[in-house]
Image (tube, rainbow, N blue to C red):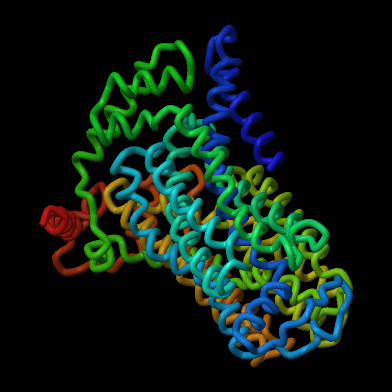
Amino acid sequence: MIIFIIVSRDIVLKQLSVSLDPRSWQSCADSGQLTVFSAVLGSLQFGYSLGVINAPQKVIEQHYGRSLGVLPEEPLLLSENSTETEKQEVHPSVVMYWSLSVSIFSIGGMVSSFLVGFIGDLRGRVKGMLMVNVLAVIAGLLMVMAKMWKPHVMVIAGRCVMGFYCGLSSGLVPMYIGEIAPMAYRGALGTLHQLATVTGILLSQVLGLEFLLGNDYYWPLLLGLSGAPAVLQSLLLPLCPESPRYLYIKRGMVEEAKKSLHRLKGQYDPSADLEEMRREKEEVEKEAQVSIAVLVRSSLYRQQLFVALMMHFSQQLSGINAIFYYSTAIFEKAGVTQPVYATIGVGVLNTVFTMVSVALVDRAGRRTLTLIGLGGMCICAVSMTVGLVYLSKTMSMSAIFLFVCFFEIGPGPIPWFIVAELFSQGPRPAALALAGCTNWTSNFIIGMTFPYIEALCGSYVFILFAVLLFGFTVFTYLRVPETKGKTFEEIAAVFKKGRKQTPGTRKTGTGTGTGTSTELEQLKTDSQA
């Protein structure tokens, strides 16, 4: 948590010290720092909810078993060292409910990812984040009271509601930060969403230690704390200004947008920013909004959509969430005597290499980092398999640590923002909704099926991910363009080169003529309908 506070502060201070009058920049930096910090609390909560289910798995499984009547009512043996209780085979019904507890989180996210645009436009970005915080508080209360009724029912219900919240928050937070960030630092501030997410994962792993909250007495509190950042965020967000771009472009409230700019940047001449928003508003009004159904049917955006969805598939089907959700069990199988501490090591590396990605993404490029990340993960998945088969503790741990490092270099953060670079303003909301749903759906598939796949494949389970990663690496090399430093028109031109000319299409000096124009008119008609 301290890490992303420091990083956000440094970025905001640096930008404001350059762009504002020296006499006023400190007060505005404080306002910008508070605004960014308040927003990314939602991302911190998202990451905490992702990682919190990992460490207390053994404890919660035994409570499930006792509630379901498949384990005797007896004191739980919960030392870090192996015990007879831990060595007992887990009952199939407990496995099913545990898998559902892990994966139900993604079902809520799948559903709510389609509502991000609606919630954000309904009352504004700030009020939208405030509204959805109610869901996080309800989810936290359900889980903190898990022992009062049937634990498996309470945890599953709480995780489902929390997933619904996180599906909204993981869209609203980047949207708000992207709109309030200065142009020169929009990318850097945008990556704070990912940094706060991995910081939340690390925080959940530390608190999940047995001598803290990951024990028989406090595990409901450990899960329930996933709603705590929402309470703090609800106190801070009313102090934050609404997005000037939302006020100007979506609502046409020029004076309110000007006031918001003054709150963010202090007393300065906002004419240049307002003029930029005016031009963007004109472009938005010219371009038809493309619905999800139209986007899926249209051949004009088919290649971009295919690339965007495959990028999100590669992120989730890489096997990274098998590590996040089940790393403690994987380390146990590899022979690690203190698997929880090894899991915390994974969280530390996850956070550190996210910051490495922040430094490299605008230098090395999106495509290059994605290729390095996917290729490295593929090699690590093979190495992990060898380590598990031959019970090589050193090889298994090294492979897992490197697997996470390669993920955060490229495949982790890049899919979240590359979709916005592939699409213009018209189809962008629909593309983001589809990409978000794809991400959450893949997350659910891995969370629900990994225990069963592991039971079937044993130590060879990561060979499956190695094959998928190899396929994604080849796809990225062949089909994904480099978007660093390119405008949308330049990116679109790359995809047009690969699109076959139809009989009704003629080439013009600026690109494609009649065929594309006809399709654009059809898109506009469909969107208006």
The answer to whether 119 is drawn above or below residue 298 in the figure is above
Whether residue 365 appears in this view of the structure is no
Query: On the image, which quarter does residue 145 sit in?
Result: bottom right
The foreground one among 228 and 323 is 228
Q: Quadrant of the N terminus?
A: top right
Q: Quadrant of the C terminus?
A: bottom left
The foreground one among 442 and 226 is 226
The foreground one among 448 and 320 is 448
Q: Position of residue 394 (x, y in %)?
A: 88, 73
Query: On the image, which quarter does residue 396 sit in?
Result: bottom right
Q: Position of residue 499 (x, y in %)?
A: 31, 65
The answer to whether 411 is drawn above or below residue 89 in the figure is above
Q: Identify which residue is drawn at 33% across, 51% down.
A: 428
Q: Identify which residue is drawn at 65% across, 83% down.
A: 65
In this rendering, position of residue 115 left or right of residue 43: left
The answer to whether 189 is drawn above or below residue 78 in the figure is above
The foreground one among 362 and 497 is 362
In this rendering, position of residue 56 left or right of residue 235: right
Whether residue 464 appears in this view of the structure is yes
In this rendering, position of residue 248 left or right of residue 387: left
The answer to whether 441 is drawn above or below residue 295 in the figure is below
Q: Position of residue 101 (x, y in %)?
A: 56, 73
| Most distant residue in the top direction | 23
Q: Position of residue 300 (x, y in %)?
A: 26, 61
Q: Identify which residue is drawn at 30% across, 50% down.
A: 118
